[in-house]
Image (spheres, grey):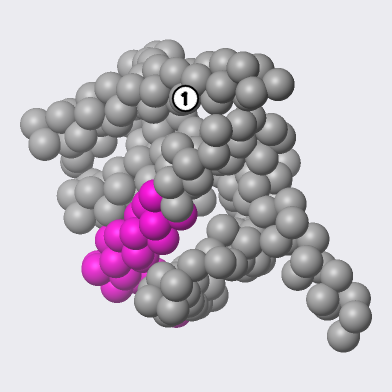
Amino acid sequence: MKQKLNIINFVIKRKYEVLLAALILHLYISMFFINLDFYTRIIWPINMLLLGLASIGIFNEKGKRSKILKNILLLLVIILPVSFPIFRSHYYFMPILSIIYCLFFSYIFYEILKYLIKPSYINSDIISAASCGAFLLVEIMTFLLQAFYYLNHHSIKNIDTSSAAHTFIDLVYLSSITITTIGFGDITPNTPHLKLIVSLFGVFGQFYTVILIGILISKFVTQQSQK
């Protein structure tokens, strides 16, 4: 019991670092697995459980409604990967899963933004939270693209369709190079609506970076003047 409380206290105290590690693992851990079927069946559910635990600290001091909404989304986010082998063939399963993940990560992103704006100081938590925001943008874009893709397989060109894991990896790749404005052009949106959505995320990624730099500089200047 005492060990369990220590783990919870650690997650709450180092919430942004824990969340950052969980986000990076979720997005990029598949690079270490040759057998992607094992990744889909075992690692993916474990990743989502870790992400759920990592998000506990973000909502620790929130109101009752926020905690209820978080718990509902968290429950769905953890259950969906486990139920993937059963319902994967259903046409609407992957779009619904993707939309729920979008809502979950968008909610966390919203809480991160609120935290970044409030304090007038800069410390390790601010830096970690800012990094979380960047990876959360990749998560949100990935699952939004995934929802569109499973509704229309022709909406994105050159996607690997050999498995759900390969498709996810390609979408993480597309999201990462779009938000960082690298844009190799090997995987591209193929419908007018999706082209606009992808371009919007590219602009929003740059906007987040510019605003974040302004916030961090402002906090640093304020902190120095107070000293």
The majority secondary structure of the magenta stretch comes to helix
Question: Whole-percent x and y of residue 170?
Answer: 44, 36
User: From this viewpoint, which residue is outermost toward the right?
Assistant: 2
State which quadrant residue 202 falls in.
Answer: top left
Asked if residue 134 lies left or right of residue 60, the reply is left
Q: Quadrant of the C terminus?
A: top right
Q: Quick check: 184 above or below 37?
A: above
Range of the magenta residues? 83-110
Q: Quick check: 165 above or below 154?
A: below
Residue at disc 1, secondary structure: helix
Question: Whole-percent x and y of residue 225?
Answer: 62, 17
State which quadrant residue 204 falls in.
Answer: top left
Q: Quick check: 227 above or below 9?
A: above
Tag 1: Cα neighbours inside 10 Å, few (<14), some, or many (≥20)? some
The three-letter code of the residue at mark 1 reads: Ile
Instruction: Give the residue pinned by disc 1.
Output: 215
How many labels sit on residues?
1
**Residue 105 in magenta stretch:** yes
Question: Whole-percent x and y of residue 138?
Answer: 44, 38
User: From this viewpoint, which residue is outermost toward the bottom?
Assistant: 1
Q: Quadrant of the N terminus?
A: bottom right
**Residue 217 in magenta stretch:** no
User: From this viewpoint, which residue is outermost toward the front?
Assistant: 226
Residue under the image location 49 percent in, 33 percent down: 134
Viewer-proximal residue among 49 and 174:
49
Asked if residue 20 lies left or right of residue 102, the reply is right
Asked if residue 54 lies left or right of residue 6, the reply is left
Viewer-proximal residue among 201 and 18:
18
Question: Whole-percent x and y of residue 220?
Answer: 60, 20
Asked if residue 168 lies left or right of residue 198, the reply is right
Residue 192 shows up from this direction: yes
